[in-house]
Image (tube, rainbow, N blue to C red):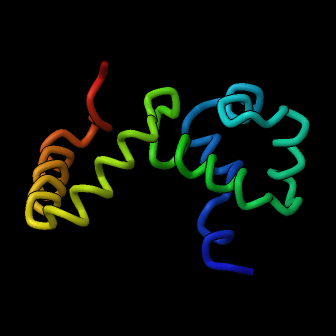
């Protein structure tokens, strides 16, 4: 068993978030019955695990994710590494100052 699989227990995450199975699994495109099987120990495909991590652990709103954003990130990282690192530090400092805030709200 991989470390990643040990860390993410979907039932525990769902309960901590206070969601029922329908609410939790629907947000990542999985039926309630499919989610129930994963919570009972059935092997979860990697794409589902990644979606679970992004949506429920990282609290990423997938409706706001755009390919262009990743292209900008790659560009900054490759062409302006100092600016990229500076921005990373600024975001981290903001998150630490506002622990309940997961990012901008637009």
- Residue 102's spot in the image, x, y percent? 32, 38
Q: Nearer the viewer, residue 1 or 69?
A: 69
- Residue 100's spot in the image, x, y percent? 28, 36
The quarter of the picture where residue 5 lies is bottom right
- Residue 7's spot in the image, x, y percent? 59, 67
Residue at image coords 89%, 48%? 37
- Residue 25's spot in the image, x, y percent? 73, 35
Q: Nearer the viewer, residue 71 or 56?
A: 71
Residue 23 located left or right of residue 61: right
Residue 6 located left or right of residue 53: right
Figure quadrant of the C terminus: top left
Residue at image coords 83%, 52%? 38
Residue 16 located left or right of residue 83: right
Q: Nearer the viewer, residue 92 or 13?
A: 92
Residue 99 located left or right of residue 71: left
Residue at image coords 66%, 71%? 6
Q: Residue furthest top?
A: 106
Figure quadrant of the N terminus: bottom right
The quarter of the picture where residue 23 lies is top right
Q: Is residue 87 above or below residue 99?
A: below
The quarter of the picture where residue 65 lies is top left
């Amino acid at each position: 068993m991989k470390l990643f699989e040990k860390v993410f227990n979907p039932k525990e995450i769902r309960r901590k978030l206070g969601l029922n199975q329908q609410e939790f699994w629907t947000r990542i495109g999985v039926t309630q019955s499919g989610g129930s099987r994963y919570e009972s120990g059935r092997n979860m495909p990697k794409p589902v695990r990644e979606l679970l991590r992004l949506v429920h652990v990282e609290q990423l709103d997938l409706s706001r994710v755009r390919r262009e954003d990743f292209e900008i990130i790659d560009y900054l990282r490759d062409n302006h590494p100092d600016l990229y690192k500076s921005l990373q530090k600024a975001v981290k400092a903001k998150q630490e100052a506002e622990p309940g805030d997961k990012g901008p709200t637009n």
